[in-house]
Amino acid sequence: MSCIKKQWWDEYIGYIINRIRLKLNEGNDFYMADLHIHTKYSVDGKNELIEKIIRAKSEGFEIISICDHDSIDIYEDLYKLYIEDKCFIDDSPIIIPGIEFTVYYEKYDDLCHVLQYFVNPYGSSLKTKIENNRVAYWKRAEIQFDRIRENNIFKNRNFKMSFVDYETFLVKNGWSFPEYASLIDYIYIEIKKKGLSISDIKSDLEKAIHMDCCKERAYKRKLALDRFNNRHSHKNIDDYPRLLLPLLAPLGIDDADYPDYEPIGSLSVKKYNQLNIRDMKDGVYVLAHPDSKKLDLLIKEIPYLECDILGYEINICNHCLDAVDLIHCANEAGLFTTVGSDSHSNSDDLYSNKSFFKLKRNNLTKLLLEGEKWYEKQLKTQYETADNLNARINLHEKYSVNKQGFHEWVFEKMNLKNGMKILECGCGPGALWYKNKKEIPTNSNVTLVDKSTGMLKTAKENIGDIINTEFQFIHGDVQKLPFDNNTFDIVIANHMLYHVEDIEKAISECKRVLKPLGSFFCSTFGKNHLCELNSLTRQYILLPKQRTSDRFCLENGCYIILKAFGNVLLELHIDALKVTNAQDLIDYILSSSYAQEQLVGKLREQFETEIMKKLANEKVINIMKDAGLFIAKK
């Protein structure tokens, strides 16, 4: 996955957290929210992202969450919309990224759904969970077609439904995995081919219940059918194809629970290797639309489940007035609540009771706090804390041939003077300054900007207090610098422009805040940088053909800068690495997100063993360095 998109996601989460904070600063008691909405990427969803946003805005919602079933495909659409039309996003309801997981919990008699908020669609743990459930859904579909063959209703009427035909049906409709809704759609088409109606199937079921030899199962089936009749007595059920679902897959009635009796062919399958509720870890999780019985179980069991379920959803589709006491108990237990519609289509009437969707201030505050905790935890990976970056810096500091370090060399080239106002964009851990503390001219005013609050914190700690020098640490984006025109004598962007979405815009911003005759310094790599290490890594890790740094490198950087400045000078830093310690090299390679996601288990053990053998045989690994500094004047 693109590093640019990973960085954008960090930016987006920070953006919505700030917007929620601003909402809370308004001091209202309630906020209009729907934190459970589906789009076309749910198998039973109907609408595009943009349609959902427009509807939510027209209905007066301030905060929404898109929670498609076991899918994060919607976030490619959100990414494009954010990049192409940020103004539209700014003027829309706050969109908390989410997902709805189907999980197994042995104490529930039917499906257990869990919502996860503030998800990172580019994180490996989320992808693993989604893939787990995708595989499980195919397993469930196989079980369901075994049940169809055992179902007397279908056997007696000579139905010829097959798993292969169903797979073709899924492909034709653009669905990548099977779900209850798509299975019911397939069966409904087959029923219509026979000239049958939903009422005919219901009539067959009523007769079948009386013939069931298992009294417990027959009793549960009768209760399920009574609930169905009470709920849908006011409508013509033949006009609603999806009503086949509660008839053919009655909740909580699974043939696997009655192994001593002849199967009835129930399509309700409780366990099929799907995620377990105990897998809901490392995130902000909420139990979706529980009834009072489920909520009671949650309150009693959550301390022992060892998962991160932190709240529950009150859903308009099954809101229970008798749950008031349980809600009080849940709040006492430290759980927060969210409100949701479970809306799959913009044509539904779920928003007729707007008062239902008033999210209390204290619950929004708790949700925000949990989101911030998770966000900060996410920022500890890759460049968001100094751990991975330090592994990279360590290799260069210990094994570089050139005794003048790169940061010291860049500092010397800048030729700083007393009293200058200096801006560094993408400061990272502040290495340029803490490595040159003694050389900083007096009365300097240095502003460090970074998109990562974790990096700013580390930079502040590393630099400390320097006499006669004022440092400011500002959370910001080089593409939209929060400074007036003509503010700084020097602007610096070291080894960071290739990470930026719009490089030309970033350079233009750097020029804008420079004083007339001010200097712009930006360093980057050449395409041959660490080429030997790159070749070695590709033996074990699948890497993109082009590196991120190729977007702004020594070969093309001059041309890009000239579009803004009209003049540019390139200075090369001549250096190489002679690595003699295997662990340092291993740590360097493992500091990348690609390695962390791919080198796991036995593959990582094999990788480390091979690196150690190589160094033991060769004694030293020579690695070319190719870096330089562009200098331009306004």
Image (spheres, grey):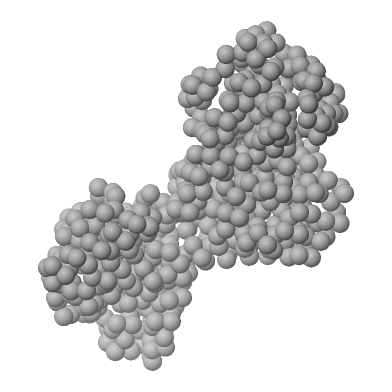
User: Splitting the image into 4 quarters, where does residue 511 fall?
Assistant: bottom left
Residue placed furthest toward the bottom: 467
In the displayed structure, would residue 346 be above or below residue 14?
above
Spot occupied by residue 396 in the image (x, y as percentages of width and height): 23, 73
Q: Residue at coordinates 38% horizontally, 49% vertically from top-left?
A: 1
Spot occupied by residue 43 in the image (x, y as percentages of width and height): 58, 32
Spot occupied by residue 361 in the image (x, y as percentages of width and height): 74, 60
Is residue 392 toward the left or the right of residue 470 in the image? left
Is residue 107 toward the left or the right of residue 493 in the image? right
In the displayed structure, would residue 269 be above or below residue 531?
above
Q: Residue at coordinates 42% horizontally, 54% vertically from top-left?
A: 6
Spot occupied by residue 362 in the image (x, y as percentages of width and height): 74, 63
Is residue 495 toward the left or the right of residue 473 in the image? left
Which quadrant does the C terminus fall into? bottom left
Q: Is residue 290 visible?
A: yes
Nearer to the camera, 380 or 154: 154
Q: Residue at coordinates 70% horizontally, 33% vertically from top-left?
A: 260
